[in-house]
Amino acid sequence: MQEETSLIKPPGFILAGGLSSRMGSPKALAILGGETLLARAANRLAPQVSALHLNWNGPIPAEGLCGFSPVPDEIGGHAGPLAGILTAMRHIARIDPATSHVVTVPIDAPFFPLDLVARLKAAIRSEEDIAIAFSEGNMHPVFGLWPVVIADDLENFLGNDDKRRVRAFIARHPMIAVNFDPPEETDSPLRPFLNLNTPEELAWAGQMLPNQG
Ligand SMILES: Nc1nc2c(ncn2[C@@H]2O[C@H](COP(=O)(O)OP(=O)(O)OP(=O)(O)O)[C@@H](O)[C@H]2O)c(=O)[nH]1
Ligand SMILES: [Mg+2]
């Protein structure tokens, strides 16, 4: 039963604050099948969340960011995905203090499930639980539903831990694993959490798009 939490549809953040060094140009603007990765992530996440935000560092490029007014990292120095997660928590706490959780997705995994948020949300049992996506035995730690009450601990962690790994931060808190194994009949190589880091991976995914099951 789900009654104990008053968690309604949460707000969402697309994290695009990284350097895209392996891609060689901003991943948000990379084209897959005629659409930017940003447009793909936004179209996929928007129906799942109460409001959609973009985390992005630096100036808005000439081609725009799909109309988003991006939210830059709270802490400087490209501290990694956790900096984007902290930014999401702090931003939501400022604009909507009643919100208990915020969902994050990375910019570079454009095939994530359409029921991602509903299933993460259904797993939450308390105001302090983190829900994280898993599939085929792997953890996908940037696909998470994060309680905003742990923002201070996250800021502290970022200030004190050299590696700033998402998994190490998650290990400090109650975490619920939510399994998203694809249906057995799916033979598409475009797995739900496939992550595109290089021009080669992007080109390969483009070639595979017509086979998407
Ligand atoms: N806000 C924010 N997000 C980040 C930061 N570093 C990485 N991310 C995001 O975290 C997700 C996964 O990171 P990576 O796949 O390493 O992306 P990246 O750092 O842009 O790419 P590389 O430079 O090739 O490692 C992506 O959505 C990135 O945009 C950061 O310093 N700040
Ligand atoms: Mg990186």
Image: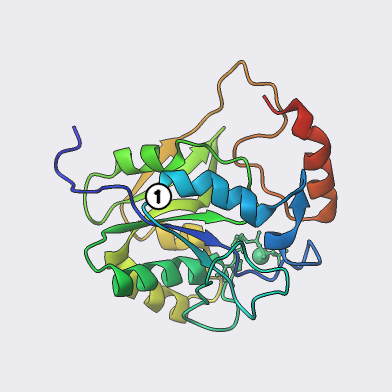
Density class for disc 1 (Cα within 10 Å; few <14, some 14-19, many ≥20) is some
Looking at the picture, how far across and down is residue 124, in whole percent? 28, 44
Q: 97 left or right of 156?
A: left
Which residue has dot 1 on it? 49
**Depth check, front residue: 24 or 33:** 33
Q: Residue at x 73, y 74 (%)?
A: 62
**Depth check, front residue: 158 or 208:** 208
**Depth check, front residue: 189 or 176:** 189
Looking at the picture, how far across and down is residue 24, in whole percent? 81, 66
Q: Quadrant of the N terminus?
A: top left
Q: Residue furthest left?
A: 4
Q: Is residue 153 visible?
A: no
Q: Residue at x 38, y 56 (%)?
A: 11
Query: Count the marks: how many?
Result: 1
Q: Residue at x 24, y 48 (%)?
A: 7
Q: Is residue 89 visible?
A: yes
Does label 1 point to a residue whose CB lies under 8 Å from ligand 1?
Answer: no
Looking at the picture, how far across and down is residue 210, in whole percent? 77, 29
Q: Residue furthest top?
A: 185
Q: 85 left or right of 195?
A: left
Q: Quadrant of the C terminus?
A: top right
Q: 155 left or right of 65?
A: left
Q: Secondary structure at mark 1?
A: loop
> Measured along the vertical axis of the image, is residue 108 above or below residue 33?
below
Q: Residue at x 85, y 50 (%)?
A: 200
**Depth check, front residue: 9 or 104:** 9
What is the quadrant of residue 66 in the picture? bottom right
Mark 1 residue type: Val
Q: Quadrant of ligand 2?
A: bottom right
